[in-house]
Amino acid sequence: MPENYKEPIRAIALFYCVNAVDRQVVKKLEGNCQLDLRLVKMPCSSMVKEVFLLRALEAGAEAVLVLVCPKGHCQFADGNIRASKRVERTGKLLGEAGLGGGRVSINDAKLETEEEILLALRQALSQADASGIAAGSKISNKEYIPSSADGVEK
Amino acid sequence: MIVAEQKPLPEIIEMVSPFKKLLILGCGTCVKTCFAGGEEEVAVLASILRLDARHKGKDIQITELTIERQCENEFIQEASEAVSANDAVLSLACGAGVQDIARRFKNTPVLPGLNTTFVGVMESRGLFTEECLCCGDCRLGMTGGVCVLARCAKKLSNGPCGGSRNGKCEVNPEIDCAWQLVIDRMTCLGTLDSLRQYCPPRDWRSSNSAGPRKLLREDMVI
Ligand code: SF4
Ligand code: SF4
């Protein structure tokens, strides 16, 4: 490996439910974690839709991670179940098209610290790598991020 | 409603591959209700096709549009501009909608994005069941509102067959025995005795077996 080799910065979009993780903790990661991280906050994970996840990939994310409340703890009854079905379907569509079904993932563990969230992000990237499609580009095209999702971090 | 499902993505990707400018045209009525061809499905498919093109290093420009119905000229006209601005249309309507679009835009290839499956209902969220074969000679009045043509695997007009077990069909135990449903319903209505009446064979000329049917309403013709 050349001496001046620098590991490429990986691009990932994080959709998170504000009831699942502490917003301040998530915000601290931004610009502070060796990742090209784009945050999309949601008042409930049920707001996540297939098209938002896909557009995050179109915008250049190599992987998309959705953080939701643990099973049985959604404040609006079944938002996390809806989110998991949509993430699953998005992965299925991507897989069917040969575009890397593993590039979208969901995590419903109770993540409290920056380190735990960072680990989940790295796991999502490894899963994306395992699915065989390396996008390797930065999230650059801001207009693609779903502004209608009520929660794009400014 | 007409129930349909999206074609497998590899088939769609192959079909649209010759075109650089593609209109994905949704239909906002039946196929929107069965989550196959409304605005959201148009947006998802457009995104997948763009990602696929980028992955293969190809250029594709996609226009997304959903009109209220693809089987009615009044609404089809709204798509005229978008159709002329593109090389091809990928229609997410039922087979009738695809054909109506193709008929009205003679110089543009129109491709089907869905497989049209049946006329049915949404039994519960996400579950659709076939309920009518459009036979042209409706006999629901004789069977308590349950269509034995569409829902009995043996299409018995005078049932049941005797093979039903625990209310399920012997051909496919996953589905309800249509004749059991008829009996339950007619018992409930107090009309079970009317089943003693023999149901004569159908005149299939009213069905699609005699070729495509036409229906003329003189009073509506101007
Ligand atoms: S084109 Fe087909 S799917 Fe669309 S409204 Fe007409 S019948 Fe329904
Ligand atoms: S009897 Fe014919 S028209 Fe009536 S529901 Fe059955 S298939 Fe449809």
Image (tube, rainbow, N blue to C red):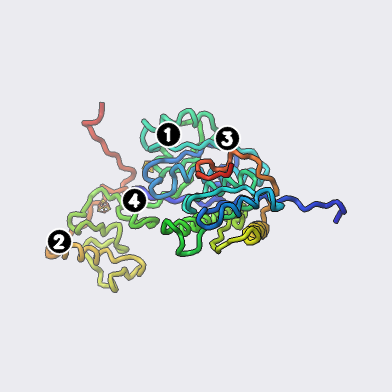
Count neighbours of disc 1 (C-alpha within 10 A) and say few if under 14, some if 14 to 19, many if 20 or more.
few
The amino acid type found where label 2 is placed reads Leu
Q: Position of residue B166 (x, y in %)?
A: 28, 73
- In terms of sequence position, does the residue under pointer 1 or pointer 3 come before the other? 3
Q: Quadrant of residue B86?
A: top right
Residue B103 numbered tag: 1
Do callouts 3 and 4 point to residues on the same chain?
Answer: yes
- In terms of sequence position, does the residue under pointer 1 or pointer 4 come before the other? 1
Q: Position of residue B46 (x, y in %)?
A: 54, 42
Count neighbours of disc 2 (C-alpha within 10 A) and say few if under 14, some if 14 to 19, many if 20 or more.
few
Residue B21 numbered tag: 3
Looking at the image, is mark 2 or mark 3 nearer the viewer? 2
Distance from mark 4 CB to nearest ligand 2 atom below 8 Å: yes
A47 in relation to A124, above or below? above
Q: Which residue is mark 2?
A: B189
Distance from mark 3 CB to nearest ligand 1 atom below 8 Å: no
Q: Is residue B189 left or right of residue B18?
A: left
Q: Chain of mark 1?
A: B
Looking at the image, is mark 2 or mark 4 nearer the viewer? 2
Q: Which residue is mark 4?
A: B119
Do callouts 2 and 4 point to residues on the same chain?
Answer: yes
The residue lying toward the viewer, choosing from A103 and B73, is: A103
- In terms of sequence position, does the residue under pointer 3 or pointer 4 come before the other? 3
Do callouts 2 and 3 point to residues on the same chain?
Answer: yes
Looking at the image, is mark 1 or mark 2 nearer the viewer? 2
x 85%, y 56%: residue: A1
Q: Position of residue A132 (x, y in %)?
A: 67, 57
Do callouts 1 and 4 point to residues on the same chain?
Answer: yes
Alpha carbon separation for disc pair 1 and 2: 47 Å
- In terms of sequence position, does the residue under pointer 1 or pointer 2 come before the other? 1
Q: Chain of mark 4?
A: B
The amino acid type found where label 4 is placed reads Val
